[in-house]
Image (cartoon, rainbow, N blue to C red):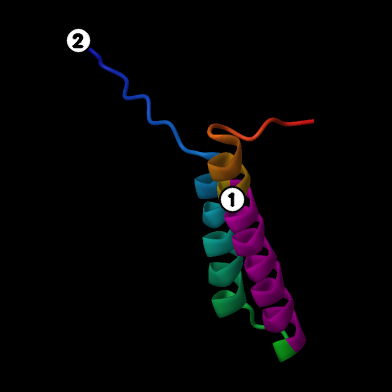
Amino acid sequence: MHYSVCIYYSRADHYRRHAIQARQRAAQALDPSSVRAGFEEVANHWIALAEQVEWLERSNGGIAEEK
């Protein structure tokens, strides 16, 4: 038998995974430091978005609605 595992990730978790990927790309960048800095900035924005979504979810008492 094959059992599939269904794991629910919040949108905040999804955004944090994007931040991790951006930081990994920054670490792997062979180009000038401006490219690394760009990936780090993108990662910081993903983290900020995750924090905002979490705040919205807490303040609304549930999942923040997409519009």
**Between 42 and 61, which is closer to the camera in this rendering?**
61
Residue at the spot of label 2? 1
Label the magenta part by its dominant secondary structure: helix
In this rendering, does residue 32 appear at all?
Answer: no
Q: Earlier in the sequence, mark 2 or mark 1?
A: 2
Location of residue 42 (image quadrant): bottom right
Question: Which residue lies at the image location 38% right of the left edge and 31% below the top edge?
Answer: 7
Total numbered labels placed on residues in the image? 2
Can you give x and y, in whole percent of width and height, for residue 8 in the image?
A: 43, 31
**Between 13 and 62, which is closer to the camera in this rendering?**
62
Taking the image as shown, residue 9 lies to the left or right of residue 14, namely left
Question: Which residue lies at the image location 57% right of the left edge and 32% below the top edge?
Answer: 63
Taking the image as shown, residue 66 lies to the left or right of residue 1, namely right
Amino acid marked by disc 1: Trp
Crowding at dot 2, Cα within 10 Å, few <14 / some 14-19 / many 20+, comes out as few
Amino acid marked by disc 2: Met
Q: Quadrant of the N terminus?
A: top left
Of all residues, the one furthest to the top in this rendering is 1
Can you give x and y, in whole percent of width and height, for residue 36 in the image?
A: 67, 81
Taking the image as shown, residue 32 lies to the left or right of residue 58, namely right
Q: Secondary structure at mark 1?
A: helix
Can you give x and y, in whole percent of width and height, for residue 60 in the image?
A: 60, 36
Which segment is the magenta one? 34-53
